[in-house]
Amino acid sequence: MNENDRSGTDKLIRAVLFLVMGAALTVGTWSIYTLLTAKFHAPKEVAVFGAGMFDIAALFFALLSQRYATSPDSGLAPRLAMLAMVSTSSWVNWTHAQMEDWGLVGGVILAAAPVIAELSFEMWHRYEHREALRRQGRVPGALPVIGGLTWILFPGRSHRVMRRTVGARLSIIDKQADTAASADDAHHVERITQPHQSIAASHGNEAQQIVITLQQPQPITAARRPDTAHDAPSEVARQRRDAPPRIITVPQPASAAASSGDAVEAPRDIDFAELSTAAAVRAMRDALPEATAQQIADALAPHGITTNASYVRTVLSRASSAAPQQGTGGYL
């Protein structure tokens, strides 16, 4: 079906929807209006508002529940309110028919009016909502069609094909979840470690520099021999442990937009020994958001992580494309 045919069909569906809802709401509002004026002798002004309050409220709650369906929150409360309004309106119409002695048929006709109006609106809006999700790529594709005769003749093979298809889709979702979890783990490590890394930026006529202060790692020494003549290396190792942190300067091209005196304090220390190369790249990017790919690679080198600018750009590009989207609430 081309776009013009689809547009024409949608217009026809809306026209029939308005016709059905108009007829059903007319019967329902007339019933309540007559009940209020003839039986309860209510003023006509009050009866006009009372005739439509149940059906109008039901439509309002239905629209509100549809809005909840596109958000992370639950739409159960407006859904229940809509059902309560429709049920109350239907009961009032049924009671009116019994008071007029119209019997079972009259009661069914009047009671069905608000139910028909609400179901018509519900079915149309559910279709529109599903089409909107499909255009956004949030509706999974259909599973392969395996006929009934195929299931009868080859039940085991049909089951394996269906199982592999579902498993392949689940593997894709699992990989996306792992990618998102690795980024969360890097942020978690950054939050729980103690802060002893500081970053400062200096600007001027010369090239811009990023100064990174790193914690001095504890040296690994061999076991000391009984000979007391080898006590001197242990003293050197102790002095090495007590030495102040090293300062590594990474050159960065000067930026015309940078202003003098800007300084960034890193909020947390990062234990790069516990991270993979990709996670370390993402963690360093979070610590140095203005650094280039080459600067990130150079900054990782003192931690024993050897990489290059091309790999850094690839990791950051994949992290950006695999960022999780805002989820949506279920349609209740």
Image (cartoon, rainbow, N blue to C red):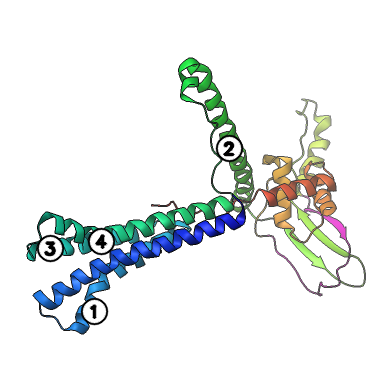
Q: Is residue 14 above or below residue 220?
A: below
Percent x, y of residue 283: 69, 50
Closer to the eye: label 3 or 1: 3
Q: Is residue 74 above or below residue 49?
A: above
Q: Which amino acid type is marked by label 3?
A: Ala
Mark 1 element type:
helix
The residue singled out by tag 2 in the image is 174
Q: Earlier in the sequence, mark 3 or mark 4?
A: 3
Find residue 48 and name its label.
Answer: 1
Is 119 left, or right, of 9 in this rendering? left
Q: Which amino acid type is marked by label 4?
A: Ala
Cα separation, mark 3 vs mark 4, equals 12 Å
Closer to the eye: label 3 or 2: 3
Q: Earlier in the sequence, mark 3 or mark 1?
A: 1
Cα separation, mark 4 vs mark 1, equals 17 Å
Closer to the eye: label 4 or 2: 4
Name the residue rendered at 17%, 61% in the picture.
Answer: 91
Q: In the rendered structure, does residue 130 fall within the stretch colored magenta?
A: no
Q: Earlier in the sequence, mark 2 or mark 1?
A: 1
Cα separation, mark 3 vs mark 2, equals 58 Å
The residue singled out by tag 3 in the image is 97
Q: What are the residue bounds of the magenta stretch?
A: 243-266
**Is the Cβ of the residue at disc 4 closer than 8 Å to that at disc 2?**
no
Name the residue rendered at 75%, 44% in the picture.
Answer: 217
Find residue 113 and name its label.
Answer: 4
Closer to the eye: label 2 or 1: 1
Q: Earlier in the sequence, mark 3 or mark 2?
A: 3
Q: Which amino acid type is marked by label 1?
A: Val
**Is the Cβ of the residue at disc 3 closer than 8 Å to that at disc 2?**
no
Q: Nearer the viewer, residue 42 or 218?
A: 42
Cα separation, mark 4 vs mark 2, equals 48 Å
